[in-house]
Image (cartoon, rainbow, N blue to C red):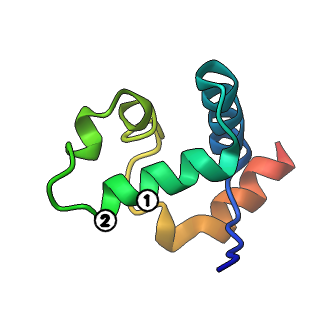
Amino acid sequence: MPISVRLPPRVEQKLADYCIDKNVTKSEAVKRALEQLLDPKAVPLSEDPFFSKLIGSDPRPGDIARHTKRLLRSGLRK
């Protein structure tokens, strides 16, 4: 089943770098990540080397999800 996902540019770049490094397609990398995320027996994402780079990588404190539009607007104005 096809699915579309919007990724922030920094995450998309990290995904592209990972895919080049591991010689896999973006689709395959996302499938692997989702399988790991949804498998209760899998290694926690915080211990996975790929995801550990992403978790907590945003230096801004607070609830970013609630203020996404405002943060994007302020970031684009700079």
Q: Which residue is mark 1?
A: 34
Please provide percent x and percent y for residue 10: 67, 39
Please provide percent x and percent y for residue 18: 60, 28
Q: Which residue is mark 2?
A: 38
Q: Nearer the viewer, residue 41 or 50?
A: 41
Q: Residue, x 62% and y 19% (percent of image)?
A: 21
Q: Residue, x 68% and y 45% (percent of image)?
A: 26
Please provide percent x and percent y for residue 51: 40, 38
* Residue 74 location, quadrant: bottom right
Please provide percent x and percent y for residue 63: 40, 63
* Residue 41 location, quadrant: bottom left
* Circle 1: element type: helix
* Circle on res. 6: none
Q: Nearer the viewer, residue 12 or 42?
A: 42
- Vertically, is 26 above or below 21? below
Left or right: residue 52 versus residue 6 is left
* Quarter of the rendering occupied by the N terminus: bottom right
- Mark 2 belongs to which amino acid? Leu
- Vertically, is 23 above or below 29? above
Circles 2 and 1, Cβ within 8 Å, touching? The answer is yes
Q: Residue, x 31% and y 34% (percent of image)?
A: 48
Q: Residue furthest left?
A: 41
Q: Nearer the viewer, residue 56 or 11?
A: 11
Q: How many marks?
A: 2
Give the class, few, some or many, for how many residues have Cα within 10 Å of label 2's Cα (few <14, many ≥20): few
- Mark 1 belongs to which amino acid? Leu
